[in-house]
Amino acid sequence: MNYLNITIAGAGILGSQIAFQTAFKGFNVILYDINDAALESAKEKFIKWKHGFQKNIGAVEEEISAAFNRLSYSTDLSSAVRDADLLIEAIPEVSVIKMEFYKELAKAAPEKTVFATNSSTFLPSQFAEATGRPEKFLSLHFANNIWTNNTAEIMNHEGTDLKVFDEVVEFAKAIGMVALPLHKEQPGYILNSLLVPFLEAAEMLLYKEVADIETIDKTWMLGTGSPIGPFGILDHVGIITAYNIVQAKALATGDTACEKLADYLKTEYINKGRLGKSTGAGFYKYPNPNFTKPDFLKS
């Protein structure tokens, strides 16, 4: 594996985490987004995550400083990918946006660059033709809180060069992930094939007014022994991502229930700036959400 220079496209929650983890593990990283505000927001996240790396994995100050020094930033796609050995795409989970991005990327990236999508729900075959290099394109999916939830699901499509697949598996290991190869295309990979229906079920219970947020979470936490319920998870994932997934399902299937749920998430949460943990409020308020309080499961 000769990957040294890595570009991450998308400075959102997960894209930023992928960038910092990759830099922390010794790679040169350029974080790309379409505007400076997104990149500035990512820099603020890095400062917060520094403490997580120190607390959760024992990172020392020298390692953190070295990671910061390996990071650079760009709003110009051509310059961001000029030397890239691997580009990991973590832009919004909207098919049209991804398709247009890959068409632009195909024009900008050098021939050597391998493309990987971090898409939570789409298949690599959906965008392979748009990349202009289907043999060098596959999926590389990470979980939130990447430094502790260190899964990396690697999924190819029929046209992916198996040598590229193996190289990306090795790259995932090199940045501290447990590499999880998938042998067939599967929407949602393994993790989200399990997680997305679970979260959608919780959202539907809330939208249909079957129970409130805390009751739903308590039920799950008490019944399974889990330290967090579906709405705590959704706040970590981000409500925009949850909305995009439900909206995409509504558009793809014509499911009117999903369409109404998407409208509900947009009206009651996104339009009100309640986007999840990253904004201090989502289904819960942060930094001390109710589900973390000692008496949450007792009352």
Image (cartoon, rainbow, N blue to C red):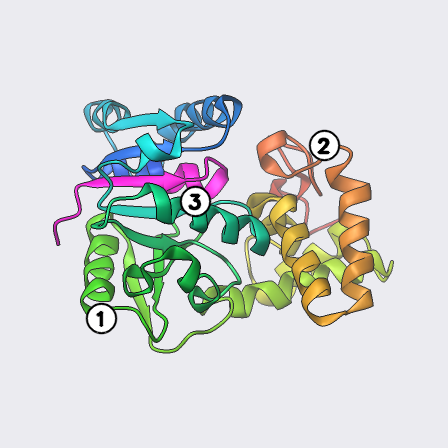
Rendered image quadrant of residue 66: top left
Looking at the image, tell me whether mark 1 or mark 3 is earlier in sequence order.
3
Q: Viewed as shown, does residue 200 lie left or right of 160?
A: right
Q: Inspect the image, locate mark 1, and give the three-letter code of the amino acid beneath it.
A: Leu
Mark in the foreground, 1 or 3? 3
Mark number displayed over residue 162: 1
Residue farthest to the left, as pictured = 2
Q: Is residue 152 above or below residue 5?
A: below
Residue indicated by mark 3: 104
Mark closer to the observer (1, 2): 1
Q: Is residue 147 visible?
A: no
Q: Residues within 10 Å of mark 3 (few under 14, many from 20)?
A: some
Give the percent coordinates (x, y) of residue 263. 80, 51
Q: Quadrant of the N terminus?
A: bottom left
Vertical side of 9 occupied by 216: above or below:
below
Query: At x 47% / y 65%, what residue is drawn?
Result: 191
Q: Secondary structure at mark 3?
A: helix
Asked whether residue 257 is in view, the answer is yes
Looking at the rendered structure, which numbered label has been put on residue 44?
none
Label 2 sits on what residue type?
Gly
| Position of 106 relative to 16 (above/below) | below
Q: Which residues are magenta?
A: 1-18
Q: Which residue is mark 2?
A: 273
Between discs 3 and 2, the one toward the N terminus:
3
Task: Say if the magenta span includes residue 84.
Answer: no
Marks 1 and 3, how far apart at CA: 25 Å
| Image quarter of residue 286 | top right
Q: Amino acid at mark 3?
A: Glu
